Amino acid sequence: MAVPVVALVGRPNVGKSTIFNRIINERLSIVEDTPGVTRDRIYSRASWLGKEFRLIDTGGIEMSGEKMSVQIKNQAEIAIDEADVIVFIVNGQNGVTKEDEDVAKILYRTKKPVVLAVNKADNPEQRENIYDFYSLGFGDPNPISGSQGTGLGDLLDEIVKVFPNDDKDIDDESIKFSFIGRPNVGKSSLVNAILGDERVIVSDMQGTTRDAVDTKYHDEKLDKDFTMIDTAGIRKRGKVYENTEKYSVLRALSAIDKSDVVCVVLNAEEGIREQDKRVAGYAHNAGKGVIIVVNKWDALKKDTHTMQDFENQIRAEFQYLSYAPILFTSAIKGQRLDQIPELVTRVFDNRHRRIQSAVLNDLLLRATSIAPTPLVNGKRLRIYYMTQVAIQPPTFVVFVNDSELLHFSYERFLKNQLRDTFDFEGTPIKILPRKRK
């Protein structure tokens, strides 16, 4: 199920980054009283009233070499394309400006809900003085103070009210998997080769796929329904999208949210790049099933050690994905493509695997006899029992005498014991310590 996307839009220096940080309760954006300083982290998961969403600070989406007015227009257009809900932020201390009106004209074109937030309403008098903003045409203005945090609860109430309805996904029982990776690693070619049909435009130029495509198909051999999410569409037509790599990250994040299993595609010719590790990290952090697909394997000159050497390099560079299976493919030659749906199904099943508590506690007894619990500052960790509390990914709670005593190294040991005993290939697993009352 896709996580709703909420975009913060507005002219420079209205406080988008401050509000972004307030909502996610972290300082992920640079905040200074200077227009245009947001540089890096522009997206994060957040939640309100039990509803999760992805928050985007569009002030961080920059188009180098463009005038500020053009950048504002481009950022607003990205929000229109990608967001489910748009939060239009204005500065209550400045009144309605021409730039506010320009942004409003762009937002009029969208059929998506727009929530108007009047920032810097820091005292009761300023919160009352918001009537001029009705002229922007987006209904009731919501007075807030990003610096003080006042009014944000009411604003978030308005945002979650207009989230899209998820009912259309309830009856879809297909296994959803996506291909993510840098441009030109062969994601679209893999989609076409699996389908046996030219459903997605393919060329040798980076960024030629124009739209993300979700394709449903039935695998006769496995007798299963799949939905392939082609994230090659990380760039859209026009200069605005080709000037910002952050847009590609946003597309990948949205696709990951919709997927049960994520295929991280590497280009065998180019080897492993830093961006490969960054993109793979998103899937891992989201708790999705992960398969590493090394595409264009036919293009390499190989000897008897080539595959093993490449796999060793992957394991060294992607240590946090030690659980992920590796598949060497060629979309052009059709090498091992039939193994992708089989592997996706296996990882999907592993991600839904449940283990009975009695079996888990037998494992726990064996594990603690192999490696006794550690002594920390003179106090020994005691683990009383273990139980599984969730799937997607499999999540286990261990009840202990003191949760602070469960060191990450012993937690890793317990995870390895679980993997040695049960088939959790392709899925992360979580262990959560809880103090027994």
Image (spheres, rainbow, N blue to C red):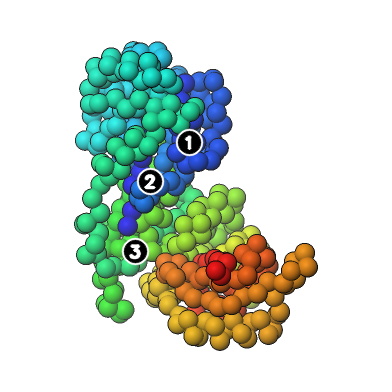
Task: Identify the residue under disc 3.
Answer: 176
Q: Which x, y percent locates residue 321? A: 57, 64
Whether label 3 touches label 1, CB < 8 Å: no
Query: Pointer 1: residues within 10 angstroms few (<14), some, or many (20+)?
Result: some
In this view, the mark in front (3 or 1): 1
> Which mark sits nearer the N-terminus, 3 or 1?
1
Secondary structure, mark 1, is helix
| C-alpha gap between disc 3 and disc 1 | 33 Å
Residue 169 seen in render = yes
* Residue at screen point 57% across, 67% down: 435
Q: Which x, y percent locates residue 139? A: 23, 26
Query: Pointer 2: residues within 10 angstroms few (<14), some, or many (20+)?
Result: some
Task: Identify the residue under disc 2.
Answer: 48
| C-alpha gap between disc 3 and disc 2 | 26 Å
Secondary structure, mark 3, is strand
Q: Quadrant of the C terminus?
A: bottom right
**Numbered circle sitting on residue 162:** none
Task: Identify the residue under disc 1.
Answer: 22
What amino acid is labelled 3 in the image? Lys
> Which mark sits nearer the N-terminus, 1 or 2?
1
* Residue at screen point 62% across, 64% down: 403
Q: Is residue 287 above or below residue 67?
A: below
Whether label 1 touches label 2, CB < 8 Å: no
> Which mark sits nearer the N-terminus, 3 or 2?
2
* 108 or 229: nearer the viewer: 108
Q: Is residue 261 above or below residue 93?
A: below
What amino acid is labelled 2 in the image? Trp
In this view, the mark in front (3 or 2): 2
Residue 155 placement, left or right of 60: left
Query: Pointer 3: residues within 10 angstroms few (<14), some, or many (20+)?
Result: many
What amino acid is labelled 1 in the image? Arg
* 96 or 181: nearer the viewer: 96
